Image (cartoon, helix red, strand yellow):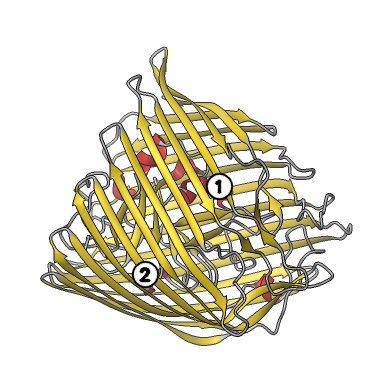
């Protein structure tokens, strides 16, 4: 299950925690991209989803896996704008940063990430950081961050053994068909991993079909001097329709989207009290867009970056993390023009342990050529009231700068729907939380968190009488609420997770509710093992009503809904091959709810398939 743990900069690679148990580990400092085991009394709050659970729960997509985590929601968006990830209810908090192995992958054009471009087969661990987040996670994380750790990381390299493979085939309603595979070739102190997949779906609405394919490789090796090397490459291709909202459809809008990424990482030790990491990366995106009006456009985006970090520590006492990043993004669009953004970011965070007290203080300075310099701050404090009770408090300040599509114009199959605003200014975001976590026994953990965010210059989209969305800065807004998380394992065969968020999010000038900010958001997940070794999972989600555009000429109220998903996974043998057959059901009790800006979900649907290991 998703363990409710508190974040730390410390880790111990050899020790594996008991599932769902809060633990204390020796303070061995590691770099951001390494597999982290979090000290229970560190101030930040995170949720961790490990590879074993990803396989056991048979997640088919990265977005599905992230959306299963307590306090985290994933809302798919049309076209290549990417999924919108929401932590603690969303609204008035700025963006959520998405990282792969510690480096940011959010698009400079849209700010989001098309999660379909990350194969679930390569994911080893997903870590969701709830705001306020530590400064070393970088800019663009004012509403939280999600770090996706890939399976090919060289820290897991082993001596040469047998090759391993996994094949997954599935199909379902609305023409869904998927195939994916992974092949791992162990080497001396390293490994090579290859992954590929393809999918098709027709969708419920006209022009909501999608074809996609992906390929990725990883090479990792640990040298004799304990220096680790990782080389990663990913390619993603998609061709799809963009149907538009139900009240302003775009049945002729189409897209072709391609993205390639490369990463090179080097990690090593600096004596007995330090570590270093260096990484370089590059992204290339190509988009061909046909709008409803018949106009066509092309967008090319290029991103290159280099980052480095050094961590110094003294066991059971302190840790100092110093690092930086430099990045250049370039967008070439035949309608909105060519734009460049050069970014430099430097950070430093100090952590101090004094018996049951842990303190964190972080400072980051960011600079971009179009919005100049701005700071970010983080301060955290945690105290162990008892051996099983932790009190935590955090405060943060950050700046969020507009993405290129907010400033100029997006290109996502709906030129007829959205405009840009080059006069936008940056958002200034203050965030705070106070939480109390208690472990009643190794199988029952409860955490209560009060949170608040104040935003100056919040960027929100206003929809006019012409049905066109235009971004504007809102003078002041706030969001505050309470989050309750409960993890309970009743027995080896039954476990339950509960996540509930109550929030109030308003424009302080007009007292209108902020867009996409429901008052109530609840999720219950139950997992069961039957005597036949069959795994059954049920997820119930309930969300109260919210508005997509409460301040515009035509406010859109999205109704409240309650839906249920279910999975059944059963192991079988095909000759000597261990396999699993599965079936997933989605939206069992609601067939047509709206989940984003008038785009309805496909409603009741199912997927069935088989996993084969060889």
Of the image marks 1 and 2, the number of the one nearer the N terminus: 2
Q: Is residue 414 left or right of residue 112?
A: right
Q: For this rendering, which residue is in front, 470 or 287? A: 470
Q: Residues within 10 Å of mark 2 (few under 14, many from 20)?
A: some
Q: Residues within 10 Å of mark 1 (few under 14, many from 20)?
A: some
Asked whether residue 132 appears in the rendered view, the answer is no
Dot 1: element: strand
**Picture residue at 59% right of the left edge, 50% below the top:** 561
Label ID, residue 227:
none
Dot 2: element: strand
Of the 4 image quadrants, the one containing the N terminus is: top left
**Picture residue at 56% right of the left edge, 57% below the top:** 544
Q: Residue furthest left?
A: 355
Would you place residue 281 above or below residue 140 in this image? above
Q: Position of residue 283 (x, y in %)?
A: 57, 60
Q: For this rendering, which residue is in front, 270 or 132? A: 132
Q: Is residue 158 left or right of residue 473?
A: left
Q: Are marks 1 and 2 in contact (CB under 8 Å)?
A: no
Q: For this rendering, which residue is in front, 42 or 342? A: 42
Q: Position of residue 539 (x, y in %)?
A: 47, 41
Would you place residue 230 above or below residue 199 in this image? below
Name the residue that disc number 1 marks: 562
Of the 4 image quadrants, the one containing the C terminus is: top left
Q: Position of residue 259 (x, y in %)?
A: 62, 54
**Mark 1 and mark 2: Cα distance apart in space:** 25 Å
**Picture residue at 49% right of the left edge, 50% below the top:** 67
Asked whether residue 565 appears in the rendered view, the answer is yes
* Count of numbered circles on the image: 2
Name the residue that disc number 2 marks: 450
Quadrant housing residue 18: top left
Q: Residue furthest top?
A: 575
Q: Position of residue 278 (x, y in %)?
A: 37, 65
């Amino acid at each position: 299950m998703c363990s409710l743990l508190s974040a730390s900069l410390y880790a111990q690679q050899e020790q594996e925690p008991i599932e769902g148990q809060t633990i204390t580990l020796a303070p061995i400092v590691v770099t951001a991209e390494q597999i982290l085991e979090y000290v229970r009394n560190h101030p930040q709050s995170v949720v961790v989803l490990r590879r074993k659970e990803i396989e056991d729960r048979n997640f088919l997509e990265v977005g599905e896996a992230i959306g299963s985590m307590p306090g985290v929601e994933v809302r798919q968006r049309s076209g290549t704008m990417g999924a919108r990830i929401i932590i603690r209810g969303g609204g008035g908090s700025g963006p959520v940063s998405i990282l792969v192995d510690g480096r940011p992958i959010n698009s400079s054009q849209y700010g989001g990430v098309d999660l379909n471009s990350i194969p679930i087969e390569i994911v080893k661990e997903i870590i969701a950081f709830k705001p306020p987040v530590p400064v070393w996670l970088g800019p663009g994380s004012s509403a939280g961050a999600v770090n996706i750790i890939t399976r090919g990381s060289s820290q897991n390299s082993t001596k040469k053994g047998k090759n391993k493979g996994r094949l997954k085939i599935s199909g379902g309603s609305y023409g869904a068909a998927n195939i994916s595979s992974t092949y791992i070739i162990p080497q001396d102190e390293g490994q090579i991993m290859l992954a590929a997949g393809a999918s098709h779906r027709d969708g419920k609405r006209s022009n909501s079909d999608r074809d996609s394919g992906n390929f990725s490789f990883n090479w990792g090796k640990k040298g004799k001097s304990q220096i680790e090397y990782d080389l990663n490459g990913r390619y993603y291709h998609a061709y799809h329709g963009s149907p538009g909202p139900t009240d302003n459809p775009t049945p002729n809008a189409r897209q072709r989207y391609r993205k390639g990424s490369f990463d090179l990482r080097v990690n090593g030790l600096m004596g007995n009290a330090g570590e270093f990491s260096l990484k370089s990366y590059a992204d290339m995106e190509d988009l061909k867009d046909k709008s409803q009006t018949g106009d066509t456009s092309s967008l090319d985006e290029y991103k290159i970056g280099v980052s480095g970090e050094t961590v110094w520590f003294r066991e059971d006492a302190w840790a100092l993390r110093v690092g930086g990043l430099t990045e250049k993004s370039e967008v070439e669009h035949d309608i909105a023009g060519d734009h460049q953004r050069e970014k430099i970011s430097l950070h430093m965070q100090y952590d101090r342990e004094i018996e049951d007290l842990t303190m964190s203080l972080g400072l980051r300075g960011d600079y971009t050529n179009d919005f100049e310099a701005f700071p970010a701050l983080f301060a955290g404090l945690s105290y162990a009231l008892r051996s099983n009770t932790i009190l935590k408090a955090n405060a943060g300040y950050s700046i969020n700068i507009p993405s290129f599509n907010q400033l100029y114009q997006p290109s996502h199959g709906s030129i007829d729907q959205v405009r840009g605003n080059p006069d936008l200014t940056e958002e200034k975001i203050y965030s705070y939380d106070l939480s109390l976590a208690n472990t009643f026994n190794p199988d029952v953990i409860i955490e209560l968190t009060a949170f608040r965010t104040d935003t100056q210059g919040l960027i929100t989209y206003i929809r006019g009488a012409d049905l066109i969305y235009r971004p504007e800065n809102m003078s002041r807004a706030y969001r505050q609420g309470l989050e309750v998380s409960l993890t309970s394992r009743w027995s080896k065969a039954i476990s339950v997770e509960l996540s509930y968020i109550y929030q109030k999010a308003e424009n302080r000038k007009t007292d209108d509710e902020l867009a996409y900010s429901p008052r109530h958001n609840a999720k219950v997940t139950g997992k069961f093992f039957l005597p036949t070794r069959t795994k059954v999972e049920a997820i119930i989600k309930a969300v109260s009503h919210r508005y997509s555009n409460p301040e515009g000429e035509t406010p859109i109220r999205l109704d409240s809904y309650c839906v249920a998903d279910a999975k059944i996974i059963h192991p079988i043998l095909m000759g000597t091959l261990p396999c699993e057959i599965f079936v997933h059901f989605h939206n069992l009790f609601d067939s047509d709810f709206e989940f984003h800006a008038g785009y309805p979900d496909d409603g009741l649907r199912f997927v069935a398939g088989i996993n084969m290991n060889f």
